[in-house]
Amino acid sequence: MENRGSGLLLHISCLWSDFGIGDLGPSAYGFIDMLHASKQSYWQVLPLNPTNTVNGNSPYSSVSAFAANTFFISPQLMLKDKLIEKSDLELFPEFSSKRVEYSKAYESKAKIFDIAYEKFKQADKKTRFNSFCKENRAWLEDYAAFIVFKKVFGGRLWTQWPKEIRDRVPEALRGLKGAHLDEIKKEQFLQYLFFRQWEALKKYANKSGVQIIGDIPIYVTYDSADVWTNPSIFKLDEEMNLKYLAGVPPDYFSQSGQLWGNPVYNWKVMKQNGYKWWMQRIEHNLKIFDKVRIDHFRGFVDFWQVPAGEKTAINGQWQKAQAMDFFNTLLKKYPDVPIIAEDLGIITDEVRDTMKYFGFAGMKILLFAFYEDLKKHPYLPHNYMANCVAYTGTHDNNTVRGWFEHELKEEDKKKLFNYLGREVSVDQLHWELIELLMESKANTVIFPVQDILGLGQEDRMNLPGVAHNNWQWRLLKDQLVDNILERLANLTINSNRSN
């Protein structure tokens, strides 16, 4: 990220559409046009992996680290490709324009997916589909089988499936796949449809001077195709049960730490096979994104593992991972891998040294900066180095306005105004902080769309630690009006960041 640039953070689900959830259709192309008009260089999205209501629709809890969320498939593009008829769109009820209605959207889209698949099966030529399946065979068939088997076995955890399927006994696996071949092919078809629409969208973005930044959660979900197909690279017992859980220890923010519940990696086993699964995962993401952010980067250096059965993260231990060997192996294969390391929270010198050694850009969050010494705080713009990505906040933060109105104490507001050199009204504060980052040394600055719009606390994307009512915010079609885009463009040009 040597060149100066700026961009916006907005997940696909947040885009406006008539189908209950944002998708890869006209609204996505329209958003790219807005990025281009406002001279932005980047569009950052959250993980594109499948979501479900069981995990609160979080994009960070998925049944696959490779598969995509098929509910982002655009019905309008399906209509254009003659996979459905115009009358099929009548199957969709009216939806809220302000909030994602996951269950309602999932149910409606499932109906047109059935229609599209039946029409696809009647097509004479399936060359592109067959090529897609061949190119993605490392994960695609097993993922599709996992989804189908979950339905066959009543949604149970994969460890509760019949032992021969749980343990992937080849003959039993072939038999069950053969018995459900059509359903498996349908899941593969939907992945094909997503990635075909995504490839076209990414090409349009790149042609418009916009690069797409993706997001890779370091850990995967226990009940996932990844753990079922690769149990040896995780710390499981002989019955495939979790031996340890991932998390972080007690700190200033939590007396009991955070217990995430993900399985931890068996780095010794992964090293023996050349980190094959991770190499495939990075390669896959480099195909679909221009740059990638790795969530919880510290986990590559050392990780907090908690014995399974614990109710909190208190009784865990730090364990060493394989950062130097892993990234040396990765960079031999992909010398110019464009990684943004999420290095927030308590970070050790070893983590910082690792990032510096490999030249990975870290993250700076401006909303974390006004609580301590205003000369030395690393998240204040005058302390930034060029090789970093600076944000007002991320998907886990409050909006600028919500932070100021509900989280910032009076003495900290005084620190903020002292740093700015004057008091600023809450209606203009978001622009002041945006300009502050624009003028900083950081090569890359990213702003959540909510902050460009000056929205309040009710429009934040996620409240960590709360299981419900997250990931639902949506951008209205007429919110990013011309005067906002023009103001953003002027700030971008004046700070030498225009695309």
Image (cartoon, rainbow, N blue to C red):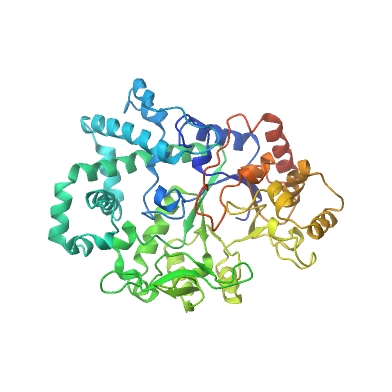
Q: Can residue 51 be seen in this view?
A: no
> Which residue in the rendered view is the most extreme toward the right?
422
User: Quadrant location of residue 35?
Assistant: top right
Q: Tag count in the figure?
A: 0
For residue 284, above or below residue 309: above
For residue 14, above or below residue 222: above
Nearest the eye: 494 or 163: 163
Nearest the eye: 366 or 136: 366
Nearest the eye: 261 or 323: 261
Which quarter of the rendering shows the N terminus? bottom right
The image position of residue 252, as x and y in percent, is 64, 70
In the shown orientation, is residue 475 left or right of residue 490?
left
Residue at 78%, 42% (x, y): give it.
428
Nearest the eye: 386 or 25: 25
Residue at 32%, 32% (x, y): give it.
111
For residue 116, above or below residue 53: above
> Which residue in the rendered view is the most extreme toward the top?
87
In the shown orientation, is residue 415 left or right of residue 6?
right
Q: Can residue 313 be seen in this view?
A: yes
In the shown orientation, is residue 478 left or right of residue 110?
right
Which quarter of the rendering shows the C terminus? top right
The image position of residue 435, as x and y in percent, is 75, 47
User: Quadrant location of residue 373?
Assistant: bottom right
User: Quadrant location of residue 346?
Assistant: bottom right
The image position of residue 246, as x and y in percent, is 45, 69
The image position of residue 64, as x and y in percent, is 36, 54
